[in-house]
């Protein structure tokens, strides 16, 4: 009986240590939530504003000959994959990787330490990814697409729906498609529409990439907060159950000791 109480006490200590860890990680995630959401909203607004300009340009008949609007069969696909720097965020990383593998691809450009580990690339950070890094990657991929080296470019990221819901999605960015409902709004382009579009696309993709990285990070923070809350509740429930078992075992041991003392005195 004594060995049983000792084992239960050790398990209670172990689960309590886990509870402290999950609580600390939950607090860290909570502290990052407001800032990450503000950055996500700013990124969305910037990307939407840039997209409206690109829509106006792609609607112009003069841009039909742009290398970024060429028709392709989509067989040679490249993906930018945005995952987290750490785990313990529920299914956040797993959902991104599952979607990536379902799409089929000839090359992956990972962002985030977990994605870099999976696709064996030098580490970078999704939390601290810079605009300069995004611009360099976007220009490289645009140059290679214009040269016909591949047919389609997508960005795999996690869309933030709410604190309780984040969805892994792919955003196809190249080739560009003609915006049906966008008008020129009387805009005069100099020197011409196609030149402006070709010069704009790398910056547009870089801006969109940064916006989706920020949205993915906000999703990661929310997923980790919910995962840590759930883990904390489970740990507390487990501690309560183990404490009850410990008390019963201890009570049984005391009762046995009393019985043995009484029996010894009677003899």
Image: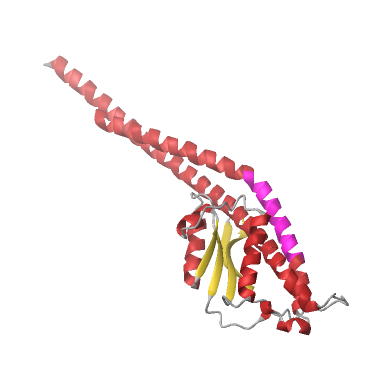
Up-down: is 146 above or below 87? Answer: below
Residue appearing at x 53%, y 76% in the figure: 76
Relative placement, left or right, of 54 versus 252 is right
Quarter of the figure that contains the N terminus: top left
Closest to the observer, 55 or 94: 55
| Main SS category, magenta section | helix
Answer yes or no: is residue 86 visible: yes
Up-down: is 119 above or below 253? Answer: below
Q: Position of residue 127 (x, y in %)?
A: 60, 50
Magenta-drawn stretch contains 46: yes
Tally of numbered discs: 0
Residue appearing at x 54%, y 57% in the figure: 83
Quarter of the figure that contains the C terminus: top left
Taking the view exactly as shown, the residue that stands out farthest to the top is 265
Relative placement, left or right, of 109 versus 254 is right
Q: Position of residue 123 (x, y in %)?
A: 52, 52
Closest to the observer, 146 or 177: 146
Closest to the observer, 94 or 104: 104
Specify the quadrant of the image occupied by residue 215: bottom right
Residue appearing at x 23%, y 21% in the figure: 258
Q: How is the image coloured?
A: secondary structure
Up-down: is 153 above or below 31? Answer: below
Region in magenta: 32-49
Residue appearing at x 47%, y 46% in the figure: 231
Closest to the observer, 54 or 13: 54
Q: Position of residue 213 (x, y in %)?
A: 62, 58
Magenta-drawn stretch contains 66: no
């Amino acid at each position: 009986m004594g060995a049983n109480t000792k084992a239960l006490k050790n398990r209670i200590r172990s689960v309590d240590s886990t509870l402290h860890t999950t609580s600390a990680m939950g607090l860290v995630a909570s502290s990052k939530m407001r800032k990450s959401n503000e950055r996500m909203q700013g990124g969305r607004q910037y990307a939407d504003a840039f997209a409206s300009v690109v829509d106006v340009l792609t609607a112009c008949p003069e841009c039909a000959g742009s290398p970024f609007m060429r028709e392709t069969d989509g067989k040679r696909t490249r993906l930018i994959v945005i995952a987290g720097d750490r785990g313990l965020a529920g299914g956040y990383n797993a959902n991104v990787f599952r979607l990536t593998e379902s799409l089929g691809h000839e090359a992956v450009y990972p962002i985030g330490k977990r994605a870099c580990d999976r696709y064996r690339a030098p580490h970078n950070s999704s939390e601290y990814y810079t605009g300069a890094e995004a611009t360099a990657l976007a220009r490289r991929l645009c140059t290679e697409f214009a040269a016909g080296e591949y047919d389609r470019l997508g960005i795999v990221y996690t869309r933030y729906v709410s604190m309780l819901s984040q969805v892994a999605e792919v955003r196809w960015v190249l080739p560009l498609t003609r915006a049906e409902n966008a008008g020129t709004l009387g805009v005069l382009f100099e020197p011409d529409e196609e030149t402006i579009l070709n010069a704009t696309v790398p910056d547009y993709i870089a801006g969109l990439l940064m916006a989706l990285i920020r949205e993915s990070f906000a999703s990661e923070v929310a997923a980790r907060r919910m995962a840590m809350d759930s883990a904390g509740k489970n740990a507390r429930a487990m501690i309560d159950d183990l404490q009850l078992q410990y008390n019963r075992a201890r009570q049984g041991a005391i009762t046995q000791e009393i019985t043995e003392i009484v029996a010894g005195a009677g003899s």
